[in-house]
Structure formats: C-alpha cells, structure tokens
Image: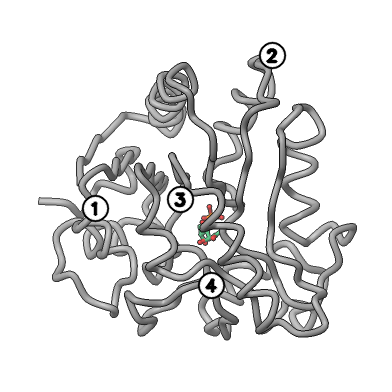
C-alpha cells in the first residue's frame, strides 16, 4: 500500500488522474468504478478528456436492491449522469438491483468480473471503513453478494433521499475478494469525516472490523488523501 497525502481534494484527484492517464496510455482494458461524492471530480476530468474509450469496459462496485436504473438515486443513474453518457465505453456493467433473483444476479456479476479482470479499481471509503458495501465483519474471502446496509451507512446515504424510509436496506456489492483481484487500486478519501476510518485502514491491524484495512495486503494499492482525511495518521 502506498500512501500519498495532498493538500486538497483537488490535488489528490489530480494525482489519481495522472495514474489513470498513464494506465490508459498503457492499454487499460477494464476499469473498476465507485459512486459517491469522492470520485466526482475525477469523473469530471475523465469525461472532459475527449478520449476514445471504445476498447474499455467498466464494472461498478455496487447497486442498491430495489432501485431501477432510471431512479435518480440508483448508482446506474449516477454513472450515466457523471460519466457514461459522455463517453463511448465498450461495455458498462453494474449489478442489476431489480433482478428477480438477487443471488443469481450475484453469480452472473461474478462471471462478468472473471471475464473482465479489473486493471484499475477506483475506491472510496465509508466512515465505518467499508469498501463497496462490504460492511465491518464481511469476510475477506467474499465474492459478489447481497449486503445488508448498516444503520451508519444508511445514515450517510440518506442525504440523497427525500424520506429516511426510502433509503434501501440492501445492495448487491462486489465482495472483498472480488475487489482485491484488481491488478491496481486507487483509494481516494477526502475530509476529516474519513480520518478515523483512514487511520484504521492504513495503521490498524488488517481486520474485518475495518474492511478497507485489507488494502494493506494489496501490492499495488494507492491511498490518496487530502489533509483532512490524513489528519489522524502518525
Ligand atoms: C460507492 C461505494 C461506497 C463509497 C463510500 C464513500 O460505490 O461503494 O463504498 O465509495 O461509501 O462514499 P462517499 O464518496 O460518498 O463518501
């Protein structure tokens, strides 16, 4: 794990974009994507790059169960709005949150990941240390699965919904093992609200209590932070 501390989120995004540009120039085929507020500026840079990405496939980490792709809170909708509609990706995969049989959907998605091994995965971290929707306690051996969202994650995500009860309780997420299979990972974290989780991820024991701590075991993981997110590091 390599840790890079930048002054601002803008500078951190610039660093991430630099790595992305180099990999893109080096034949990147499959890009793993996250949603949330953290990668928004990175996606803005990518979508205004004017690149031909017709040879690049994207796979997203997760999707809420029960939200259709045209629901503005779905991750599918977010990706369309922030990136996909501006670019000519070969394929763009997200789990189908409306699948009749979510278990079968997890198996289908895992097959997609096998056929499209991720070259570079973008990640954010939850205040409780989650990656994707792998909440504390999730096995490091997990593959794509149905996850029950913790109260803290539902709390963090309720800003996007009108009513608290509209926040989904379940999601389909790539597992920790599926995420760790990426050849390279860029984890971005911004702001003091992430500082505790970042400390556990970087300095804590590798433990399911902080799912992101597993990144300590990845040989090509970049943790790129702004000063706020890094403020509790020794
Ligand atoms: C999003 C995802 C989540 C977020 C994390 C941070 O697809 O899987 O793990 O990366 O919750 O979210 P933000 O960036 O909104 O703070």
Q: Nearer the viewer, residue 119 or 122?
A: 119
Q: Is residue 225 left or right of residue 62?
A: left
Q: Which mark is residue 218?
A: 1
How far across and down, in percent of the image, does residue 204 sit?
15, 66
Quick check: is the Cβ at mark 3 less than 8 Å away from ligand 1? yes
Residue where numbered disc 2 is placed: 50
In depth, the one of 110 and 97 nearer the eye is: 110
Q: Give the Cα distance between marks 4 and 2.
A: 32 Å
Crowding at dot 3, Cα within 10 Å, few <14 / some 14-19 / many 20+, comes out as many
Image quadrant where residue 125 sits = bottom left
54 or 10: nearer the viewer: 54
Instruction: Give the number of marks.
Output: 4
Residue located 68% across and 70% down the image: 158
Q: Is residue 115 above or below residue 165?
A: above
Query: 179 above or below 170?
Result: above
User: Looking at the picture, how far across and down is residue 123, in whole percent?
Assistant: 45, 50
Q: Which mark is residue 123?
A: 3
Disc 4: which residue: 144
Residue ranking furthest to the front: 115
**In this picture, residue 198 sits left or right of residue 30:** left
Q: Are marks 1 and 4 in contact (CB under 8 Å)?
A: no
Disc 4 + disc 2, Cβ < 8 Å? no
* Category of crowding for the residue at label 1, using alpha-carbon neighbours closer than 10 angstroms: few (below 14), some (14–19), many (at least 20): some
In the image, the residue with mark 4 has its CB under 8 Å from the nearest atom of ligand 1: no
């Amino acid at each position: 794990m390599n840790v890079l501390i930048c002054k601002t989120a803008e500078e951190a995004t610039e660093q991430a974009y630099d790595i992305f540009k180099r990999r893109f120039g080096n034949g990147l085929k499959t890009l793993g994507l996250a949603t949330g507020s953290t990668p928004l500026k990175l996606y803005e840079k990518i979508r205004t790059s004017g690149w031909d990405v017709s040879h690049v496939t994207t796979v997203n980490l997760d999707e809420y169960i029960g939200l259709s792709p045209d629901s503005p809170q779905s991750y599918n909708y977010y990706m369309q709005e922030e990136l996909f509609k501006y670019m000519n990706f070969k394929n763009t995969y997200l789990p189908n949150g409306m699948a009749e049989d979510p278990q079968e959907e997890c198996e289908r998605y895992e097959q997609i990941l096998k056929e499209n091994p991720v070259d570079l995965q973008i990640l954010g971290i939850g205040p409780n240390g989650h990656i994707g929707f792998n909440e504390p306690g999730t096995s490091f051996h997990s593959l794509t699965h149905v996850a029950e969202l913790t109260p803290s994650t539902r709390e963090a995500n309720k800003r996007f919904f009108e009513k608290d009860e509209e926040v989904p309780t379940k999601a389909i997420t790539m597992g920790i093992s599926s995420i760790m299979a990426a050849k390279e990972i860029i984890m971005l974290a911004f702001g003091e609200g992430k500082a505790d989780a970042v400390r556990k991820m970087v300095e804590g024991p590798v433990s399911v209590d902080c799912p992101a701590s597993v990144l300590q075991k990845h040989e090509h993981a970049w943790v790129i932070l702004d000063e706020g997110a890094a403020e509790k590091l020794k």
